[in-house]
Amino acid sequence: MQLYNTLSAEERAELIDEAGKQRLTLSFYAYAKIQDPKAFRDALFLAWNPLEVLGRIYVAFEGINAQLSLPADAFYTFKNHIETYDFMQGIRLNIAVEHDDHSFLKLTIKVRNKIVADGLQDETFDVTNRGIHLKANEFNAFLNDPNTIVVDMRNHYESEIGHFKGAITPDVETFRESLPIIENQLADFKENKNLLMYCTGGIRCEKASAFFKHKGFKNVYQLEGGIIEYTRQVQAENLENKFLGKNFVFDHRLGERITNDIVSRCHQCGEPCDNHTNCINDGCHLLFIQCDACKEKMENCCSSDCLEVIHLPIAEQVKLRKGIQKGNMIFRKGKSEALKFKSSGALSDHSLGVAEKPKKIRQRIAVKKDLVGKGEHYYTKSKVGLFLVEQDALYVGDKICISGPTTGNQELTINQMFVNGSLANSARKGDKVTLSLPFKIRKSDKLFKLKP
């Protein structure tokens, strides 16, 4: 039985582009008692891999938490399959507001102790005794009630780029941190206030609402389906949208726009911006907000220190990282003294700017391109990329696209190139081409020629 991925992320991205099919990004969760999470995990992989499902899924004794993408034409086959499990019959699938065919590039299904880490050891806590679910119109009505306290159950880097008006936005990095903080902060309001909660898709509120009921809060409510479902209902029913900005998502997109309001700033220059990036330094990967101007100036780095590091030879970079523990303990979520304009905790409801009109979902697919070659090396000091031409020909004046999961899609026109070490106007199959580039490439990046 094949219970693992046989293709790399780069190979999968190429196949997605070649297929030209629209993919849907969606999420769902279910709290249930699963007797054998490992057997459940294996069964899901065997059923979903042939359907070209890609994503990040966690299963545990307490249920399933899934964020994934799949070809649109496989949606109902997938839905029929998951509903063969009793606890997922009629389950709500949260379809993303914006889609990206590269939102996920591998199918990863992991067995965890819990589908949402909460840090709780209380065996008397019943996660199924949850609060009352509210639809979008009901949620809006509660927001207008002065007897309501609304709490964002997400982390600081999520709420910074978008949140509901008037919400308490805890300055936390993990869900488990927020539970005791909110309990203590609202201890005096257990009896006489409406406790209203929301999160991305509902799963954190499901557990949080049960926790607060367990702690004695009388009037506990949660937004059904989270921000994703709220947005769908607002659009479908033409309701007032009380959410401002972007909804952070945990895939390649890092966010989907809900309103055109920009409520955050570039962490480096302070200009209105709500686009997250990960520091390109492999020893950092700090998640932070960076505008296009700073991205170009800082070459996708969070600080001048990281900028210096990426210009070192690869061997020296690896040497600097040697012995440093990897993982979430060092890959911090946007907390650094280098980020002068970072905001967290109490956030303003004031819009700082208006976002540009979003590109059409299928715009990237509409661009016709031919695969020409692949990346071989990037010379950081000279800012030159080396490519191997594997098919077709390349000419000065050609419009090209360099594409990869980390690099993204970078389009440019060839004004000058060196072929096998010499200045030339054309390159053929087997030639090695060097191009001056303002961005770093990876060995796995693909070189495409754009068709007119």
Image: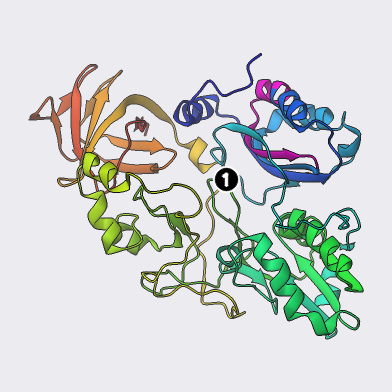
- Using the rendered image of the protein, determine whether residue 12 is visible from the camera's viewpoint: yes
**Residue linked to disc 1:** 361
Image quarter for residue 219? bottom right
What's the magenta region?
A: 46-61
User: Does the magenta segment cover residue 55?
Assistant: yes
Question: Where is residue 108 drawn, in percent x and y?
Answer: 61, 33
Q: Residue at x 53, y 46 (%)?
A: 252
Establish if 357 lies above or below 410. below
Circle 1 packing at 10 Å, graded few (<14), some (14-19), many (20+), is few
* Residue 307 falls in image quadrant: bottom left
In this image, 350 relative to 204: left or right?
left
Where does residue 448 sit, x and y in percent of width and height?
35, 30
Q: Residue at x 60, y 58 (%)?
A: 248
Colour mapping used in the image: rainbow
Compared across the picture, whether 356 is left or right of 304 comes to right
Residue 422 shown left or right of residue 97 in the figure:
left
Quadrant in which the N terminus is drawn: top right
- Name above or below for residue 239 compared with residue 450: below
Residue for point 21% across, 19% down = 428
